Amino acid sequence: MDRTLESLRHIIAQVLPHRDPALVFKDLNVVSMLQEFWESKQERAAFPSEGVVIYESLPSPGPPFVSYVTLPGGSCFGNFQCCLSRAEARRDAAKVALINSLFNELPSRRITKEFIMESVQEAVASTSGTLDDADDPSTSIGAYHYMLESNMGKTMLEFQELMTIFQLLHWNGSLKALRETKCSRQEVISYYSQYSLDEKMRSHMALDWIMKERESPGILSQELRMALRELEEARKAGQELRFYKEKKEILSLALTQIYSESDTSSPSDDQLSLTALCGYH
C-alpha cells in the first residue's frame, strides 16, 4: 500500500507538477485538476486531440443530484456520494475520475506478459476452462487471451474501452449471431478492434432492440429497468460506468425511434411508463 501511494505521488508530481501530492484529493478544485491531468497527457503522449473531459448532470428538481464525467477514450465515472447540489455532484464525479486516472498510470495497470498470465489464470479459476484453452481462440479463455495479447502495452482503461464494445455485442446478441455465421472469435475480435463505439454503432444496436421489441413486446421496458438499476448500483459503488450507461442510451434511442414511428395519437399506459423510465435516475 505504501509503495502504491508513493507511486501515485510520483505520478502526480510528473503530470501535475504545480500541485501538492498530499493535497490533491482534498482540493475542492478537483474539476480543474482532472482537466489539467488530461491536457498534460495530451501534451506528453500525443493523446488524441479530440479527447476532452465531458460532464453530464441528470435533470432533477431537487437533491440528490447525479453527475457523470466521461474521459478521453470513453471511460465514464459518476458521483457515488449523496450530493445536495449539482456542483457537489460534479466535484465528486471528478474526484472518482481523477483517482481512477491516476491509478491507471501505475505500472501495474499496464498490460504485460506477467499481467496476461495472471489474468488468464484467474479466468480459468472462475470458469470450467483449462490453461490449454488459452491457446485456442475458439474458446472463451482463448479469445480473452488473444484480446489481452493484442493490447499488449495498453493501460487497463484503454483495454476497458475495447472490452465495453464486446460486452455490448454480447448483451445485444450480435456475438451469438456472428458465431452462427461461422465467424471465428479471432476474426470477430480483429474486426471490431478497428472500430470505436460511436453513434453509428449505437444506432445499429438500437435497431436490433426495436426488432426484439416487435418480436417480444415489453422486452425494452424490462431491459431498460435493469440497465437503470445496474447503472445506479455501479455508480454508487464507484465503478467504471460506460457499459451500463451505453446500455441505457441504446435502449432509450430504440424507444425514441419506436415512438416517432408510432401512428397512434395518444400513447398507451405502457408507453407512458416507458417514457417515465427514460427520466429515471
Image: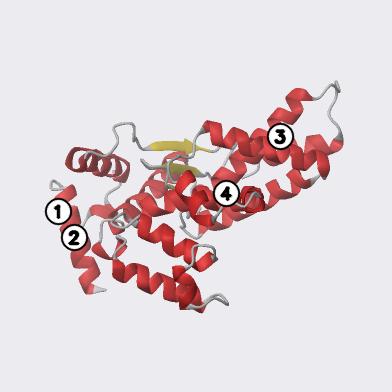
Label 2: state its secondary structure: helix
Q: Alpha-carbon distance for marks 1 and 3?
A: 47 Å
- Going from the N terminus, do you reach mark 4 or mark 3 first? 4
Q: Alpha-carbon distance for marks 1 and 2?
A: 6 Å
Q: Alpha-carbon distance for marks 2 and 4?
A: 36 Å
- As shown in the figure, which amino acid type bears the numbered disc 3? Leu
Which residue corresponds to mark 4?
A: 168
Nearer the observer, disc 2 or disc 3? 3
Query: Relative to the observer, which residue lies in front, 56 or 164?
Result: 164
**Circles 1 and 2: CB atoms closer than 8 Å:** yes
Which residue corresponds to mark 1?
A: 13
> Looking at the picture, how far across and down is residue 33, in whole percent?
26, 44
User: For mark 4, does the 10 Å Cα neighbourhood hold few (<14), some (14 to 19), or many (20 or more) residues?
Assistant: many
Assign the C terminus to one quadrant of the image.
Answer: top right
User: For mark 2, does the 10 Å Cα neighbourhood hold few (<14), some (14 to 19), or many (20 or more) residues?
Assistant: some
Q: Alpha-carbon distance for marks 4 and 3?
A: 18 Å
Query: Relative to the observer, which residue lies in front, 191 or 115?
Result: 191
**Circles 2 and 4: CB atoms closer than 8 Å:** no
> Looking at the picture, how far across and down is residue 239, in whole percent?
47, 57
Tell me if residue 44 can be seen.
Answer: yes
Label 1: state its secondary structure: helix
Which residue corresponds to mark 3?
A: 255
- As shown in the figure, which amino acid type bears the numbered disc 4? Leu
- As shown in the figure, which amino acid type bears the numbered disc 1? Ala
Q: Alpha-carbon distance for marks 4 and 1?
A: 37 Å
- Going from the N terminus, do you reach mark 1 or mark 3 first? 1
Residue 9's disc is 2
> Looking at the picture, how far across and down is residue 167, in whole percent?
55, 53
Q: In the image, what residue occupies the spot 86% across and 33% down?
A: 268
Query: Relative to the observer, which residue lies in front, 47 or 130?
Result: 130
Q: In the image, what residue occupies the spot 45% across and 75% down?
A: 122
